[in-house]
Image: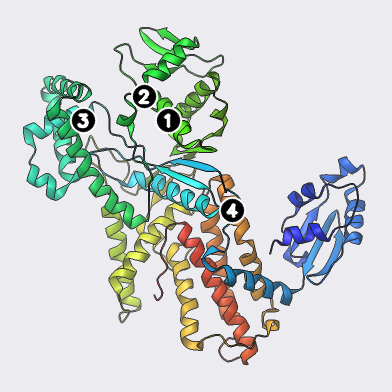
Amino acid sequence: MDYRQLIIDSINIDGIDKQDLLALVTAPKDSAMGDLCIPCFKLAKEMKKPPMVIAEEIATSVDKGDMIEQVTAVAGFVNFKFNNVKFAKQVLADVLAKGDDYGKSNEGNGKTICIDYSSVNIAKPFHMGHLLNTALGGAIYRIYSALGYNVVGINHLGDWGTQFGKLIVAYKLWGNKKDINERGVRALVEIYVKFHKEEEKNPSLGDEARAWFKAIENGNKEALELFEYFKEITLKEVNRIYERLHIKFDSYAGESFYNDKMQPVLDELTEKGLLQESEGAKVVKFDDDMSPCLLQRSDGATLYATRDMAAAFYRKNTYDFDKCLYVVAYQQNLHFQQIFRVLEMMGCEWSKDMVHVAHGMVSLESGAMSTREGNVVFLEDVLNSVVAKAKQVIEEKNPDLEDKDKIAEQIGVGATLFGVLYNSRIKDMVFSSDKVLNFEGETGPYVQYTYARCNSLFDKCGEIGEEVDYSGLDNASSKAIVALLDKYPQILQESAKKYEPSVVTRYAIDLAQAFNKFYFECKINTERDGIKNARLLLTKATRQVLGNALALLGIDTPQKM
């Protein structure tokens, strides 16, 4: 039930737009004042009355009905208290009737969202630096899908550039196909690092690399076969990691896909008088302090910006998106500002629908990483390490637990995802496996453990009987859970609006903490049947919503821990 709408429908007063009023409904800072409130300060100017007077008029107009128990006007606020028992009964019925669909909606029906994320580089490691980008994109994908949008996940592969010429040279000099087939990208990285070390001693290797990349561009058979081989090896490896992270894509159209789609964009820019020559290069200049957007070098080579321009047109023509999101680190802020501005100058009305979902960086306590220098940390190694530590914790705390390997995988991967999604996406973070695996902190394992604790209650108490006395939920700790359960659909909407999965992770912590408080404060199994069943229903609904929230984040829920 939408209790915000219920409040608005209960108000009978002229001179106020109810949609405007709905936007004002919020939770009071002090929960003792009520369950929801309407601050009237923004209405004062429009209605030409003091907020206190408006609050009094609204409060006296309310038809309380069965659900609203009390309405008070205090210092310019209208406070609403619901009947705890009826409120709990309605919310639990709603959660349990909808199950896995609770919180979902059809608000996005008929609308398409393109999300460009992860965008790994071919023949380079899927390293720790890719984790936040990939986790964010996956979560945003699932959140928008839950709200009924047609979501298109795009992995804009980094599969173009001189580095492929370097890799071909390295492969022909030092490559071992059997070793590469067995060790994958790790073997490719080794010869790539060796190339850069040898190039310092023999600069002519750089000329060879450029020649081989030119051969790729010209469609040379051997060059293309090696290029496709490197791509195949990389995708086989990264797909294994995507599967562990529950990440999916609908398109793997990378940079190379747009090679034949850039010239029409450059031609249109020329026709519209936007593309100017600057020291032999082709740029679009802006009428403010923003630096020009470089689209073609003096030697005719195109750049990331050129390919992103071509990709933008392709995506609009192919998917007719309502929004196109680019989940990319904040270091690329200027790049996307330039791209969006150029599209606007070209008269693309849809440029306003393109959004750079900027995020911070994830590093390890050991510091920065560089493929060229060879000091990279493979994401797969990080996942394996956290999973191994999770299994150690299981061995210590619950050595008799069945399926320890499976549960350790769920906990370890879940801890990693929750850890990078917990804070606001724009923040940089230093990843620590010890911190994300803390079972008592604001972590994934804490939420997973709470979910498993809900299951354990049913093991102890059995199934829920028919007799239900909802007065057993007329207490502060039960009421806190019910209010949070009711809030979950709004959490999804807020998270989507802000492109911010941390809204969901923090909600999951709040719900888990509220349930554990209830668990320690309220007896369940020793209560009479009606009370026990009501509290078990609350437990079942909590378990459902915790599971729904974790699923949006790509996190599994172990049945036992």
Q: Is residue 53 left or right of residue 436?
A: right
Disc 3 to disc 2, C-alpha distance: 21 Å
Q: Nearer the viewer, residue 367 or 140?
A: 140
**Which residue matches tag 3?**
164
Are dots 1 and 2 in contact, CB under 8 Å?
yes
Q: Which mark is residue 261?
A: 2
Disc 1 to disc 3, C-alpha distance: 25 Å
Q: Secondary structure at mark 3?
A: helix
Q: Is residue 406 left or right of residue 455?
A: left
Mark in the foreground, 4 or 3: 4
Q: Nearer the viewer, residue 207 or 109?
A: 109
Identity, as a three-letter code, of the amino acid under mark 1? Tyr
Q: Secondary structure at mark 1?
A: helix
**Which residue matches tag 1?**
314
| Crowd band around label 1 with a 10 angstrom C-alpha radius: few (<14), some (14–19), many (20+) | some
**Which residue matches tag 4?**
106
Disc 4 to disc 2, C-alpha distance: 35 Å
